[in-house]
Amino acid sequence: MNILFLDQSGKLGGAELSLIDVASAFGDRCLVGLFADGPFRQALEQHEIPVKVLTDQPLLVHRNSSFWQSLKSLRQIVRLVGKIVRLSQDFDLVYANTQKAFVLSAIASLFTHHPLVYHLRDILSPEHFSQTNLSLAIWLANHFATLVIANSQATKQAFIEAGGRAEIVKVVYNGFEPASYRVPLSTSSELRQQLNLDNRFVIGHFSRLSPWKGQHILLEALTHCPDNVVALFVGDALFGEQEYVEQLHHQVTESRLSDRVRFLGFRSDVPQLMTMCDLVAHTSTVPEPFGRVIVEAMLCDTPIVAAAAGGVVELIEPGKTGWLAPPGDALKLADVIHQCRRRPEQTSTIAHRAKLKATQCFQLAHTNQQIAALLNTIVKPCSSGFEPTRMDMTKQ
Ligand code: UDP
Ligand code: GLC
């Protein structure tokens, strides 16, 4: 089966890191088409996954764009749709990994009649999207998607509640390679020394800097903790959230936290950094669709506390494999931090159990098998390989 994957971003967000894992399974039987150049293209090349940047101008439509703003980008959209139509001639199916990629692929499918898969990684709710974008995504999915792969039950539920057809959506969790998260103790203690963190209780936060990822909540929690509790923020503002970054730095100064907070920017040694931490905090203020960082912390054997909303509650059993705090509740977060410091043995038992659970439940091999099985139901094998057919998922 030959697949044309499409993604709107050139940056390395969770959706893109996950696509590298999915596309790797198809090797040179796929092409990843991007709507922007950047580190994602380089990462795909490093993994020897065929990639092509389809435009040299960034798409101007945003998550909260109005209908009129969207119309202004019409010329650019028409050009991209044309490219998708031409490219898809060589493939059995089109697999859209992000919302804009899906919208454009849906329009293209009017001309190509290829099966269209939408890997839905967003919670389609007014908290995340403008009403226009929301309605458009649902309408197009109901009319043009052969299959919607949701990254969690929460994502699936939100899709259905927004009017999406239940019979076309299947849940497949992100998968991980547990071996990539096995870090020698010597490496993490060296890293701790390099960063001058010995004798500190280190809380790691691994997310792009963005208001809804809630880095400010961890800063607030820190003001309720003793001075030897410090925070590392790993990640960058990927989508122009410069104002929020300034706000965070201001909060650090105002709360006199300069000695207890580090911003490390985007890093490619997340497993090493996570293993070095005493606790990983996830603080999204709106429902997180899945939350790769949560499973990654579990695989690193590092205790995790996360914001109890969206897909997160499917990943953590509170008190057994981690802790949950209500989104935006800095006091509850501080309370969990105290508990972890006070009861190190109980904390590491929970972390070990979480590692075991993550290793059993989020294997990349299993995720890729699930995706392959779903794709096989919509592209019928024929004598010369695979024959694309548009099948109604309701009939299976
Ligand atoms: N990540 C990374 N370097 C960083 C910060 C984050 O590689 O400096 C990775 C992180 O390990 C995770 C992904 O980015 O795999 C973020 O995915 P997640 O699902 O947690 O959130 P998203 O950003 O996709 O909403
Ligand atoms: C999106 C979501 C994130 C999820 C990732 C991978 O970026 O925001 O929660 O983990 O996709 O599916």
Image (cartoon, grey):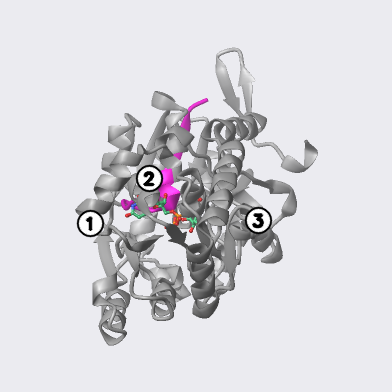
What's the CA distance linking mark 1 and mark 2? 16 Å
- Going by the numbered disc 1, the residue's amino acid type is Leu
Q: Say what secondary structure mark 3 lies in.
A: loop
Specify which label sits upstream in the sequence, 3 or 2: 2
What's the CA distance linking mark 1 and mark 3? 32 Å
Of residue 229 and residue 219, the one placed in the foreground of this image is 229
Q: Is residue 192 visible?
A: yes
Q: Which stretch did the figure color magenta?
A: 1-17
Q: Say what secondary structure mark 1 lies in.
A: loop
Q: Is residue 31 above or below residue 83?
A: above
Badge 1 vs badge 2, beta-carbon distance below 8 Å: no
Image position, residue 10 (x, y; %):
31, 51
5 magenta-colored: yes
Q: Is residue 290 visible?
A: no
Q: In this view, does 27 lie above or below 358?
A: above
Q: Is residue 110 above or below residue 359?
A: below
